[in-house]
Amino acid sequence: MDIINSVEEMQQRALTARGNGQKIAFVPTMGYLHQGHLSLLEEGRRRGVLLVLSIFVNPTQFGQGEDFDDYPRDLRKDCALAEEVGVDLVFAPDAKQMYPSGYATYVDVERLTESLCGASRPGHFRGVTTVVNKLFNIVQPHVALFGCKDFQQLAVIRQMVTDLNMPVDVIGMPIVREEDGLAMSSRNVYLSAAQRLQALTLSAILGESAHRATAGERDPQVLIEAARQRIAELADARIDYIQICHQDSLEDMTQIDDNAVMLLAVYIGDTRLIDNGYLLR
Ligand code: AMP
């Protein structure tokens, strides 16, 4: 497995692989890998001849006062895990490589980015779509794998790929959870033991809401109110949003059907956690 820091070298390797008829599968991440990332890599391994993992904590997707400086990083451990799952190339550029002085171009997806995380993190998705666009140009993937953990991000990336006619097959992969239900996230390391216990309420709410929807509840407000009350019982929790949205438009639903996804963003202490799940599948 090779570790590449240079944009030019990565792009050259990708173009050469393409010239040799190799299919490139790509998993972009911010590193500090866990089983969620590894599930994407395992699927990528099945789908591509050349499997590329990028590790880049992208400054343009963090807002003022967010956790860019504190974001957990461990490149050595990440590379060991990547090697175990059969990654061929790790692309780990630094910020100066990706955004040299004079950098001036951004990609902005309208509408889908205005609600949910986009509303509470202005500029976040602009940073995401810009870096994913750059990474696609550098890594030249045929297939790129993303987690449904970041449900809105996946929808925004699909929209960008469609709108900009990018020849990349975007695959969404299921959320990988700890045994107790907590969605895996690099940010979970920020949680104290007491906070981690409170964080379990997120996946519990998704489970209970799906259960009630399956039993016949069709009013989103009833489930949202019940969820709000559950969160209010927690000592360290603060709701960013709890919404039930259509899977494609991400607009709020007035009646629950097969398209309904419940999306949560909740601060536990200073740590912002997100989770989501379909209500009727
Ligand atoms: P990140 O490093 O947090 O930017 O995530 C990189 C990719 O891994 C994104 O496509 C995420 O959606 C995906 N991912 C993160 N956590 C999980 C999880 N628990 N299960 C599945 N995919 C995940």
Image: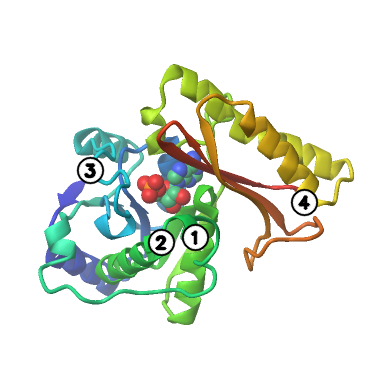
Mark 2 neighbour class, 10 Å CA radius: few under 14, some 14 to 19, many 20 or more: some
Q: Earlier in the sequence, mark 1 or mark 3?
A: 3
* Residue at image coords 72%, 45%: 224
Percent from the top left, x then y, of residue 128? 37, 62
Label 1: how many Cα within 10 Å (few below 14, some 14–19, many 20+): few
Circle 4 residues within 10 Å: few <14, some 14–19, many ≥20: many
Pick out the residue farthest to the top.
193
Q: Which residue is mark 1?
A: 119
User: In 3D space, how far apart are the residues under numbered discs 3 and 2 (Cα atoms)?
Assistant: 18 Å
Earlier residue among tags 4 and 1: 1
Q: Amino acid at mark 4?
A: Pro
Coloration of the structure image: rainbow
Task: Say whether residue 118 is left or right of residue 181.
Answer: left
The answer to whether the beta carbon of the residue marked 2 is less than 8 Å from any atom of ligand 1 is no
User: Looking at the picture, how far across and down is residue 280, in whole percent?
Assistant: 78, 49
| Between discs 4 and 2, the one toward the N terminus | 2
Secondary structure beneath dot 2 equals: loop
Residue occupied by mark 4: 220
Q: Which mark is residue 122?
A: 2
18 on left or right of 207 = left
The reply to whether the residue tagged 3 has its Cβ within 8 angstroms of ligand 1 is no
Instruction: Residue type at mark 1: give it.
Output: Ala
Please give the name of the residue rendered at 73% of the width and 42% of the height, measured from the top-left corner: 225
Compare residues 25 and 163 and report the one nearer the observer. 163
* Residue of label 3: 69
Q: Position of residue 21 (x, y in %)?
A: 32, 71
Where is residue 251, by image quadrant? bottom right
Q: Is residue 234 left or right of residue 9?
A: right
Tell whether 184 sits left or right of 18. right
Q: Most extreme residue toward the right, as rendered?
A: 216
Q: Is mark 1 within 8 Å of ligand 1?
A: no
Contact (CB < 8 A) between labels 4 and 1? no
